[in-house]
Image (cartoon, rainbow, N blue to C red):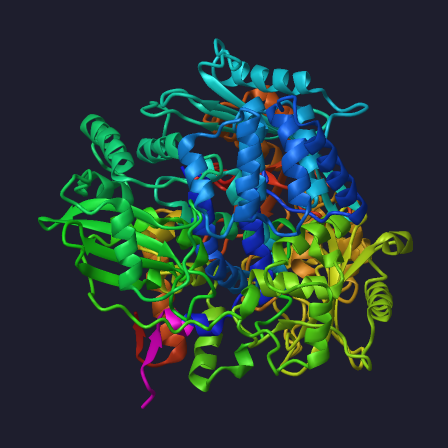
Amino acid sequence: MKRTMHVNQDALNALLPDIPLEFEAQMRDLIASMPAERKEKPMKKKLSAGFVLALVLCLLAVSALAAALLGGREFVEKIMAPKAAESKSEYYTPKEIQEILRIARENNLLLDPEDEARIRNMEEGYYKEELIRLFASMEYGPQPAQWPLEVQRWYEEMLNACGLGDGAVHAVLPEGNEITQEQALRKAADYVRDHYDPDVDLEDKALYLREMTYHEEKESPYHTIRSWWIHYEARDLDHPDYEFGLTPEGEFTYVAVHPGVFSPEDPDPAQTILNRITRQHRDEYGFVTYTSEIMLEEQSLLQKLADQQGTDGWNEKNRQILSTAYILPDDSMLTREQAIEKAKAACGEQDYYTYHGHGETALTIRVNGRDVWKITLQLKGSPAAGKGNRLFVQLDARTGEILYCDTSLETRFWYQEFFPEEYYLARLAAASPVPEADTRPTPQPGGLPWFWRDSRFPSWYWDKLEAVGYNGDTASRLMNQWEKEYGLDSLFWPLECQAIDEIWHSLPGPEGAFPGLPAADEIQQDAALQLAREQFKAFFSEYVPTADYDALICGARFQFNSVDDGVHSWEITLLRPDGPVAGSVTLDAKTGEIYHMRMVGAQHEYASPAYSILQAPSGEPLIHSDPRMPDSYWDTVEALAEKQGVTKENIVQKYQVWLQEYGEGAFLPLELQAIWSAYAPRGEEDTWLAILPQEGLITKEEALEIAWKECLALAGANSETDTAWAQTLTPSAALWLQDEAEPTHWYVQFWEKERIPGFGEQWNSRVEIAIDAETGEIYQSGLWLNSNG
Amino acid sequence: MADRLEYERVAQEALPALYKIAMGMLRSDADARDAVQQALLRGWEKKENAREGAFRWYLTRILINECRNIQRHRMRVFPVDVPPKAEMLPPDYQDLYSAIFALPEELRLPLMLKYLQGASEKEGAAALGIPVTTFKNRLHRARKQLRKTLDREVMFE
């Protein structure tokens, strides 16, 4: 008797490969970078010895002058920047801080007393960039994105010169044919007036806070992008926010509208309340120190919303906020500081972050009649398996009795570290009074990962990594230096830099694939690039003209154990001059053997056997003679194929030629679609088939007309005009034969007209409509990525 | 509607599963990477359109659309790679692997969403852009076909 089979998450997980480590790291960076690219990023950069000397001399000169009072900008330029340039650390030392604050007082530059006390008390010193910004903001306002573009440029150049700037992203001023700041603002304002609010005055400073940047990003040594970012942030809770991205030529790359609280158009008013309240309490870096006062404010607005509209459709988090008994601390309770100290003492001698926004948070809540402090502490170092970096502590608000102290499985993902409020919501009751021992690997001195100099990799490898100046604490500065020198894409960084980047950002341990370096007796980088380029060109020579191959740019990575344990491999990526990936080659670092090769959009890969739909490896015909269509149909298709010179041997090459001509498979004439569909290599399970128009079915023209009406109806729901859609979209149509899931149908798509030709770049379809080819009924339609489908 | 934080939280959490779903559909590492990356970019662009609390399934749907883009819009109708794990699996799992990939995609996806990603029927339907009843129906057919192919008792957990 056969054993019972269990189909569950574990089983299915085992069937599919895990996301490759290096790709996962890339994607996590991508996710993290998307919000960041619209906000200014703080700090870092390398400095030259000459510049340090100049700054030191400048400082001496200024000390001699002494008499005249300095403004915020002058103070930054003449006092803070030279001090920052004296060391490579991201922090001013406590001693430097005392001196800076003394000179600031002498110049009548006074910080907020609370800020000053906090900064003076930081045992580890204080971020240079943050302190510099505090003084610069005295002259220009709190956020660099609100400063004039010229000042933004000054500020970033000053940070760069001190070694604190953001490597590959620079504030710039428009040049040549690029639109001016005024033109960019006018475009944004016109857009809002035309599409959302004809009476809005976005420049009303009482109503809107404007943020605007013009940045240049160095993607790689070969590719640079400039872009405008404009954000109108409503100062109250009621008005919508507007956000725009524009190209240097003034084309919108995106437009986002964020509705105000209680807006009738808001599909998610509860979330908007949380967003807006959070925003009101964030600091200049976007961090919120949650307090019971904030939570009570949120709760009050949510209650009002619930009274008006009910709570249908709310998520669990909002419901919990509504039902949680937040209380304000009173005199009979431990103070916040006392509670945090008790929490730290109770949970052992561990290394915590103390920096505000990254460090502890605390709320008072009544749970089952007992008033408790709920506290989170941020631990330093890598978490142990199944553990997080955030320590959760609950204690009696009056007696200080520890009720719970542990990290949580819920925080095993790093991103959850940044959402301490989840803890207050999700873990209202104390679960365990027993602190667990911390079994995390111990980081090495200076912040080096615990596996540094692991014996699985040769000592010369570690020596080379250390030779670039990495000692744990220097990572951030080095990353910015490399971004500046080599661009944002680490593919073009030296291999040592790539390895450190990967180790620092993402690697939990030395197991599995690991960023490597070639040994002396292995193929070196130049030779590997040459070999990859030759092999790529030889294998795909039928598809692309030689000149295009010769224009490709190559970048290399080196991996230990990626292909298999013990194998050292080169992973070469080939890019078009304008940036997109054209293909990749993976080869053995010892023998040069090609493991894998692919060309984007080539529909073909090295060492991947493909067989024709007309004849499986067994010799049996597959689709030809498919009973869903009569024999006469297959005769017609064969005749058309013959006319095109198509055979099962050359169909892939033919298809590439057609793609060059038409740009995308969906744009092929129906005859070519039918030929490709019938002749293309495919798996036996693929039963769907594009066919020629048939009697009794609606025509392509009729299908397009039906689809266009539907398209406009969908567009209306998105406030875009008929004319705009007609100008920006182009249709395609394919007739698909009935299969198990769908009737014979016309599949009409409306594509964005903008695209980059060559090397199989994807076009983007905005609207997709499926029409029953017999009845003309639309049975599926979707505006791309609209959740209503 | 998802905000910046919601996007980041959900995308980071869902990333490994998104890749598996893409591999389940495309069976090519290269294509799966393209689909995941494109889905993350589009998810960011369109995050405001997601329903409250449903961004994960919204993002999954974007991914599925992107996989279909790759398959259908380019008329790419054949798998170019096979996941390397297949031959390394225990015999039982090899059978399961064969049976699951013998399912047409319309049946395979509901199964993966339900038992790999832990989607409820409502969430799975949202991810696929189909009515809940259709989702249930396809799930039922998928289970039935798996039992038939594997010719044994199959527990779905």
Q: Residue A296: horizontal and vertical position, in percent?
A: 23, 34
Left or right? Give the position of A398 relative to A789.
left
Coordinates of residue A221 in the picture (x, y in percent): 79, 49
Q: Which quadrant of the figure contains the C terminus of chain B?
A: bottom left
Please tell me which residue is depicted at 38% across the width and 66% down the height of the picture.
A387
Which one is in front, A630 or A23? A23
Is residue A410 toward the left or the right of residue A158 in the image? Answer: left
Is residue A2 located in the magenta-colored stretch of the structure? yes
Residue found 69% across the figure and 36% down from its top: A158
- Magenta-span inclusion, residue A141: no
Quadrant, the N terminus of chain B: top left
Give the number of marks: 0
Magenta region = A1-11
Residue A561's place in the image compared with A167, above or below, is: below
Seen from the viewer's position, the closer of residues A579 and A66 is A66
Foreground residue, A153 or A561? A153
In this view, the residue farthest toward the left is: A369
Q: Quadrant of residue A697?
A: top right
Q: Please name whichever residue, A611 or A671, is drawn nearer the observer in this view of the structure.
A: A611
Q: Position of residue A122 (x, y in %)?
A: 46, 47
The answer to whether residue A719 shows anywhere in this view is: yes
x and y, in percent, of residue A480 in the image: 67, 50
Q: Residue furthest top?
A: A199
Image position of A248 with respect to A454: above or below: above
Is residue A757 visible to us here? Answer: no
Residue A675 is drawn in which quadrant?
A: bottom right
Asked where in the image residue B116 lies, by quadrant, the reply is bottom left
